[in-house]
Amino acid sequence: VSDTAGVAFAGIDDVRSRLAEQEYLCDRRVATVVFLATAIGKPVLVEGPAGVGKTELAKAVAAALDRKLIRLQCYEGLDESKALYEWEYAKQLLYTQVLREKIGELIGPARDLRAAAAALRDQEDIFFSDAFLVERPILQAIRAEKPPVLLLDEIDRADEEFEAFLLEFLSDYQVSIPEIGTVTATHTPLVVLTSNRSRELSEATKRRCLHLQLEYPGAELELEIVRLKAPGAGEALARDLVATIQRIRGLDLRKAPSVGETLDWAQALVVLGARSLSRELIEETLSVVIKYDGDAAKVRQALAADGEPAGHAHPHSHSH
Amino acid sequence: VERVVLEFVRLLRRHRVPVSPAEGLDALAALQRTGLGDREVVRAALRATLIKRGEDGAAFDRLFELYFGLGDEARPRPDRPPPHVHHNGASPTELRFGEDLEGDPLGEEGHSHDDPSPIDLRRFLEEDELRPGSDLHGEPERLRLSVFGSQLMLSRSQDALEQAMKRMTHQIRVRRARSFSPGSVAPESGAEQLPVDLTDSEFADLVEELRAAGVDEALVQAITAGADDILAALPGLLRSLMERQARMRAAAAREAPAASLSLQRMLERSPGDQRELELAIRRLGRRLHGARTRRMRRARTGRVDVARTLRANLGYEGVPFEPVLRRRRDQRPRLVVLLDVSLSTRNLARFWLQLVFELQSHFSRVRTFAFVADLVEITPLLEAQGLAGGVETLFAGDLIDVDENSDFGRAAEQMRTGHLGAITRRTTVVVLGDGRNNGRPPNVGALEEIARHARRVLWMTPEPRWGWQLGSCDMARYEPACDAVEVVRTAADLGAFAERVLAAGSVAR
């Protein structure tokens, strides 16, 4: 656990400030979980709707700790040979071909068949040694020189078999490779799993992880994020924008706008030179945040019902 | 810290939030790092380590408030910033007040009555007794200790004791003074100042009474030994009891989780609650889902797996002597659903349909038949009009006469003659109905023939087993023909049944 020396987080506030340096703003709740994950060396399972910054969190933590980020995108049919290790068959094959010619010299003056076989046996392990091993993300994380951050992205897309396979790794940070044996992590990696909850993960997986439920940021936090990441947007515009986005998220949409889309929208409005958000402007640029026709119709309806863009109704609009 | 975590974990478990010992240890480790200073940090730490399902979040928040929030709202004290948690570590008496809200789990009644530890008192404040409607609520002028009494009875279950207690509860009364109300409680420092006049002598009387009634001596000893503690703690307990009651009353409405409510009752509730149930079913569906496996398995026919072939043939210098083949396997079951839509099972049918809808991707083909007396396939109807519309049309009675008395025998016969082709060796047949034929021939033979063609026949009935004997119910006769008959009364039951149907698919290859 002490392997994080030098760059480890000192406390919850330290987590927050250092993540903020990486332009990732979060509340104390998130910071607490991140701190605990590094402090007690447990994987973190981050769940939440798409676009709340689950993956970003892992990236920001890696950057803040100055650790390497190893990322494994999960998908249906992912298996050990893609996630853990694979033998380099072609190379093995090539070596056998080459060795066939040299075999006489290598075995040397063997007296009889038995001695030759014994001599050969002494050598055979080389085919299943590191030289022929292709490291995939999980093995990389285990054997890394410095403790890395391992991101298992969208674990809910992987099969249940893969989840079961992960259990050994998640609880003990070790994996068993039949030909080599058990490989244990020299440094505890910080493991971050993300899930969109397209299916429920197994109890066993959840039990081994700290659980963090990320939701869309509240108005204030989102405003700060917009200020930070889209500095071109004026104060009034930023407020209008965030208020409108928050209003849109409150509707029953097929896909609520993500934080990323908020920022896209902000950028788009900055490019258009907008100072504040008007009905017409929303109408014209809505496609940046709303990706389905049905959703767009709902949003128009709701905003029309409000009479004005939500931002203008906001009492604090001009109090800054 | 250990105690706080341990008790809180117990509390969660009692409220059906599953917490494993390992998670408890994590929580402990977490709190040791964060300390107990900041309430929000404690909350985040406990939540991250203990709560893994979204739906448990609400329960967690509620219990966290109850456990760590006692008295804080009632007495805001700016001079001690985050009081509750330090509180717990402060002194034993305070600790008790702070934590005894929920009491020990009922499950471990056995041991602690024999040791005279003051914590015993906590069990007298079991949550159930504190619900609105207990006599505490009904009789505001007198705060009777009947909770106390009934707990003793529960743990010893002796008639004699019961008698004594009945008398006793009338004797010991704690009178409430005019000023004593949940909102404005006496200052924290003066537990003694509370207008509670249970005196030592009255307590002695109680003990005498118990002894006279022939109560087991050890128990009397235990109570006597704990007397001081009990007396000292009483005002505090009462106070927390009152406060809690106010809160319980507010919370009572949104208490019961949808999954454990009876479906029947659920339907009588407001549309909002029904939505909640729908959500519960959707969650259930998602949990059962799992990702469908797309992994290739070795097979005798199929595509060549290059890597494995090379690997297997290294011994032949890589000449692929023995190709390794693999193939994707589709092992989803087919499902035929027979729904009795007569009045008695209509509600259940509705929920079952919804669940099947959620789980559709698990089955390679779903065909749905509805019947009361006559049988009709509603698969195309559901496809055309969607779930809600289809159910609406069906129950309106345009397709079949839904006001008839149900006749399983006839429906089974029609299934056998008309739709036996729908049932193959890969088919799981799910029958939903109460098996009430209203005196008509049960026609078990037809069901048996259906069962012979199907992989499995599972029957789901809303009626508990003891009801099968009553009236014209042929359930007992149908049961031998089915692979399983399950009584489904709550959403949770429904989920268990669905799991069973899915399992039926994956067992046989």
Image (cartoon, coloured by chain):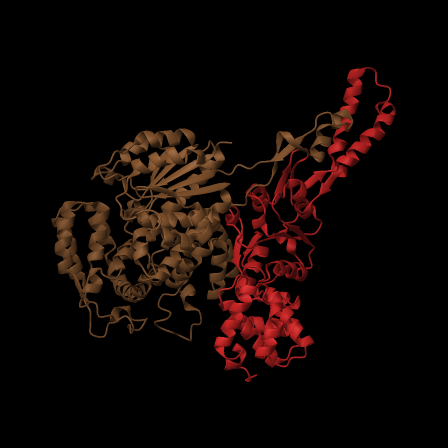
- Residue B471 location, x and y as percent? 20, 39
Q: Colour of chain A?
A: red
Question: In front: B4, or A257?
Answer: A257
Between A190 and B248, the one lying in front of the other is: B248
Of residues B352 and B404, the one nearer the viewer is B404
Rendering quarter of residue B336? top left
Front residue of B447/B129: it is B447
Residue A300, percent from left and from top? 53, 72
Vertical placement of B208 versus A162: above or below? below
Can residue B1 be seen here? no
Question: Where is residue B280 shown, x and y percent of the image?
Answer: 41, 53
- Tell me the brown chain: B
Q: Residue at x 30, y 33 (%)?
A: B478
Q: Quadrant of residue A287?
A: bottom right
Q: How many marks?
A: 0
Residue pictured at 22% horizontal, 59% vertical:
B134
Residue B140: % across, % down: 19, 67
The quadrant the N terminus of chain B occupies is: bottom left
Residue A139 visible within the image: yes
Residue B371 position by quadrant: top left
B139 sits to left or right of A313:
left
